Image: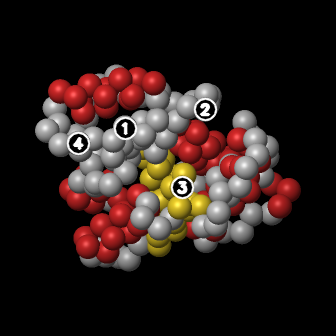
């Protein structure tokens, strides 16, 4: 099961699913048009359970998928960098139910703050899978893991209203990133980003 983040990644994952995989594959697409502050890497080679860097950073790592979740995470990480100087790496992991353990260990590196983001319920989501993988790896020193996702019945409204209600808009993600890093944000310091 995969959810691409860019138009180019849709093409690449579709081609990979049809021509390289022998198992059933579910391609989950987002139909809402969303401006992306990043691009799919031209030289990226698809490998099941592996992802790519949307935004580099060294003070924390946030895993997500899909266009609007990663775009909002990218902007939230930029806000954290602007206001605190801390740099959060944002990773696209389009594989929703599979993680390559070697890739995951390498991606985590020495980073102690790990954030997972799901654009649906936390239970059964990618964040739960990654938390289990982190525990299985038994990495030391211990990691601070924060899971972000939907915890109650999804509401109706405009895209911006729904994202804000469920804490998946830029401002909410920036607040959660600060909390994961052990910081409190002054209410007036968070700027409104697209």
Residue, x 76% and y 46% (percent of image)?
A: 157
Task: Determine whether the residue tagged by mark 4 lies in a helix, strand or loop.
Answer: loop
In three-dimensional space, the C-alpha distance between marks 2 and 3, rounded to whole angstroms, equals 15 Å
Which residue is disc 1 drawn over? 27
Q: How crowded is mark 3: few (under 14 residues within 10 Å), some or many (20 or more)?
A: some
Q: Label for residue 131?
A: none
The image quadrant that residue 193 belongs to is top right
Which residue is disc 3 drawn over? 120
Task: Determine whether the residue tagged by mark 1 lies in a helix, strand or loop.
Answer: loop
Which residue is disc 2 drawn over? 32
* In-image side of 93 versus 106 (left or right): right
Q: Which of marks 3 and 2 precedes in the sequence?
A: 2
Q: Which of marks 1 and 3 precedes in the sequence?
A: 1
Q: Residue 55 location in percent, x, y?
A: 49, 41
Q: Residues within 10 Å of mark 2 (few under 14, many from 20)?
A: few
In three-dimensional space, the C-alpha distance between marks 3 and 1, rounded to whole angstroms, equals 16 Å
Task: Determine whether the residue tagged by mark 3 lies in a helix, strand or loop.
Answer: strand
Q: Residue furthest right?
A: 188
Q: Residue 10 location in percent, x, y?
A: 39, 28
In three-dimensional space, the C-alpha distance between marks 2 and 1, rounded to whole angstroms, equals 16 Å
* In-image side of 127 versus 141 (left or right): right
Residue, x 28% and y 46% (percent of image)?
A: 50
Residue, x 64% and y 48% (percent of image)?
A: 76
Against 23, is 6 above or below?
above
Q: Is residue 106 visible?
A: no
Q: Which of marks 3 and 4 precedes in the sequence?
A: 4
Q: Label for residue 24?
A: 4
In three-dimensional space, the C-alpha distance between marks 1 and 4, rounded to whole angstroms, equals 10 Å
């Amino acid at each position: 099961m995969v959810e691409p983040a860019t138009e180019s990644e849709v093409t690449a994952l579709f081609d990979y699913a049809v021509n390289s995989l022998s198992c059933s594959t579910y391609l989950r697409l987002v139909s809402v048009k969303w401006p992306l502050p990043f691009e799919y890497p031209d030289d990226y080679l698809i490998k099941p359970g592996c992802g790519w860097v949307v935004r580099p950073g060294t003070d924390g790592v946030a895993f997500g998928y899909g266009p609007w979740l990663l775009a909002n995470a990218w902007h939230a990480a930029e806000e954290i960098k602007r206001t605190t100087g801390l740099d959060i790496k944002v990773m696209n992991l389009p594989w929703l139910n599979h993680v390559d353990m070697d890739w995951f260990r390498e991606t985590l590196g020495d980073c102690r703050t790990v954030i997972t983001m799901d654009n649906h319920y936390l239970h059964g989501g990618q964040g739960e899978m990654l938390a289990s993988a982190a525990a299985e790896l038994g990495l030391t020193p211990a990691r601070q893991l924060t899971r972000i996702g939907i915890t109650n019945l999804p509401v109706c409204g405009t895209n911006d209203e729904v994202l804000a209600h469920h804490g998946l808009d830029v401002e909410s993600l920036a607040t959660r990133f600060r909390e994961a890093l052990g910081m409190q944000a002054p209410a007036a310091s968070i700027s409104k980003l697209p």
